Image: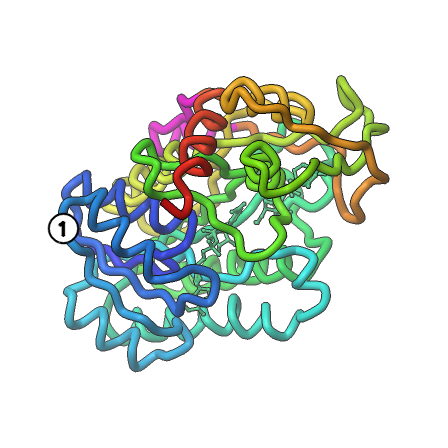
Amino acid sequence: MNVLLTGGAGFIGSHAAAMLAEAGHYVVIVDNLSNSDASVLRRLERVCGHPLPFVEGDIRDSALMRSTMKQHGVQSVMHFAGLKAVGESNEKPLDYYSNNVQGTISLLQAMDQCDVRQLVFSSSATVYGQPQYLPLDEAHPTSATNPYGRTKLHIEEMLRDVAASSAQWRFVCLRYFNPVGAHSSGLLGEAPRGTPNNLMPYVAQVAVGTRAHLNVWGDDYDTPDGTGVRDYIHVMDLVEGHLAALNFLQDNAGWSAINLGTGTGYSVLDMVKAFEQASQRAVPYSIKPRRQGDVASCYANPQLALNKLGWRATRSLQDMCDSAWAWQSNVGK
Ligand code: NAD
Ligand code: WQD
């Protein structure tokens, strides 16, 4: 199929591009490079063995989206483009609504005008808000505790309304838990700008010596070792879930929301230990007060993905850390 990847130069989108190309699909990337750079494209060419069509632009530019879809005979869209920093969303809510919600509206309008009606959406477990029970299944109530999460919820509901307006539309909202790790080539990975908010890239930078130590945000949670528990999922498992969702859309109209997680939770200290094993480097840390907005535990019930998509995660925490270390060790080479 001819697949348009919005935000395809980013962490998850670039891994999806490599996986789809390897699976024989024609991939075209649209990205405004607001949180990535063009070097990813050269590394994608090395991974894929051929260049991938790339359009530098913003999803809010409907005319550009239309011309790109027509030029490349786009049949389906994987929508990765978005701002994703929870803390920043509290400071700049309008930027998040414009970029994420308005951007998705512009994209959908362009799709409608080009008769492109299949979309896989990058949603987030953050739409579950404060867990009322665990593991989290798709029936869990949704809510938002920050503007970022609210944009994801708004987009999910908007897609549900559009799907209800015509049987031609086909949407899957994939609710990611905590994507980590990197492509086996060591050429693709997570490259956050500035100080990483997320655990794994921060731990990787401590291991490689870029940062002196890790701050562990709280060790007084009701978890086995007191530190936060999350459902870390290898980015390659995650993007394979996208391929399964794309195949699902060929035979299923309507709207679905599906968790992409492993179903297993690991603590911060579990992650530190696994990363020290992967890197054979010490990861010094100090315990600090809890980070505002953090929950104690968050992990998925992944059963619906298996039932509907025939997909489940297969890679271990050690695989995640091994691949992240290989990437971190390569960065800049
Ligand atoms: P990322 O920032 O690495 O990638 C997003 C890409 O989209 C970037 O390359 C950026 O330049 C591009 N982009 C942003 N706004 C754009 C716009 N208006 N027009 C065109 N391109 C634009 O982030 P990621 O980690 O790869 O996440 C991809 C998607 O998955 C995001 O929508 C994010 O909200 C979602 N998600 C990520 C996580 C995570 O932990 N990484 C978890 C849940 C959901
Ligand atoms: C994981 C654990 C921290 C950093 C976030 C977003 C979510 C989604 C995924 C986009 C927690 C602890 C972290 C550090 C630490 N992104 N930690 N020291 O918060 O589960 O989810 O990323 O959709 O929306 O909220 O991921 O990696 O930030 O934190 O102790 O320097 O690691 O307290 O327990 P989180 P995270």
Please determine whether, in this image, residue 94 is positioned above or below residue 123: below
Please determine whether, in this image, residue 22 is positioned above or below residue 192: above
Residue visible at 26% across and 44% down in the picture: 18
Foreground residue, 209 or 78? 209
Percent from the top left, x then y, of residue 147?
Answer: 67, 62
Q: Which residue is mark 1?
A: 50
Which quadrant of the view contains residue 90? bottom right
Determine whether, in the image, residue 324 is placed left or right of residue 62. right
Q: Which residues are magenta?
A: 302-315
Q: How is the image coloured?
A: rainbow
Which quadrant of the view contains residue 165? bottom left
Percent from the top left, x then y, of residue 50?
Answer: 14, 50
Foreground residue, 179 or 281? 281
Count all numbered tags in the image, as a single digit: 1
Determine whether, in the image, residue 130 is placed left or right of residue 74. right
Which quadrant of the view contains residue 221? top right
Residue visible at 77% across and 19% down in the picture: 225
Residue 324 in sight in this render: yes
Q: Secondary structure at mark 1?
A: loop
Split into quadrants, the picture shows ligand 2 in the one at: top right
Residue visible at 69% across and 24% down in the picture: 269
Percent from the top left, x then y, of residue 262?
Answer: 50, 26
Determine whether, in the image, residue 307 is placed left or right of residue 82. left
Please determine whether, in this image, residue 60 is positioned above or below residue 75: below
Residue visible at 52% across and 52% down in the picture: 192
Residue 139 in sight in this render: no
Foreground residue, 269 or 71? 269
Determine whether, in the image, residue 251 is placed left or right of residue 87. left
Mark 1 is surrounded, within 10 Å at the Cα level, by few (under 14), some (14 to 19) or many (20 or more) other residues, namely few
Residue type indicated by callout 1: His
